[in-house]
Image (spheres, rainbow, N blue to C red):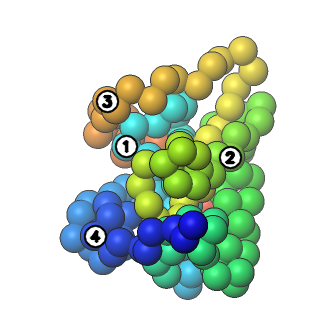
Amino acid sequence: MTSPSYDDQNIFAKILRGELPSEKVYEDENTIVIMDIMPRADGHVLVLPKKGSRNILDIEEAELTAVAKTAQKMARVLKQAFDADGITIHQFNEGAGGQMVFHTHFHVIPRTEGISLRPHTGEMEDSEKLKANADKIRAAVAAHS
């Protein structure tokens, strides 16, 4: 059974082309990091490859390496910026695996001992709170550079 092909009309592809807004906190040659607009914890970000791929099943090895390196960088940044006790990294593949947007992406989420992840309700975060968290992350990225 073959996987469906990449659809360049998905929301992340549109964000990458500048057709939809996002709160970007980091970018390099191969990846971009944006705030999750429905965060499961404060500071929840999404690491995306700039080159289109559906998920880990079809991403090119070099692109996967770039995304993994950026996810690691963001884990370190978020741990510091949010004084987190740990980091959760999620990566979902295909609908049965929990994937909702079919562009490869990693969720990087700062965690605090004793505080559960918020449920994925589909409710968008308050834009001012999202921007404040993004500013905190951007400052931490600058400090790590």
Q: Nearer the viewer, mark 1 or mark 4?
A: 4
Can the viewer see residue 140 in this picture? no
Q: Earlier in the sequence, mark 1 or mark 4?
A: 4
Indicate the secondary structure of the residue bearing disc 2: strand
Query: In the image, which disc is placed on residue 138?
Result: none
CA–CA distance between discs 3 and 2?
21 Å
What is the number of the mark on residue 89? 2
Sooner in the amino-acid sequence: mark 2 or mark 1: 1
SS of the residue under disc 4: loop
* Residue 43 in the figure: left or right of residue 20: right
Q: Which mark is residue 37?
A: 1
Q: Which residue is mark 4?
A: 9
Q: Is residue 71 above or below residue 51?
A: above
Tell me the residue at 47%/42% (across/down): 133
| Side (left or right) of 86 relative to 21 | right
Which residue position is annotated with label 3?
123
Give how far across and how far down residue 125 sits, in percent: 34, 34
Taking the spot 71% from the left edge, 81% from the top edge, the residue there is 61
Neighbourhood count class around disc 2 (C-alpha, 10 Å): few under 14, some 14–19, many 20 upward: some
Amino acid carrying label 2: it is Ile
Residue 58 placement: quadrant: bottom right
**Disc 2 versus disc 1: distance between alpha carbons?**
17 Å
Extreme residue in the front direction = 1
The residue nearer to you, when weighing 125 against 144, is 125
Nearer the viewer's eye, disc 2 or disc 4? 4
Q: Nearer the viewer, residue 4 or 74?
A: 4
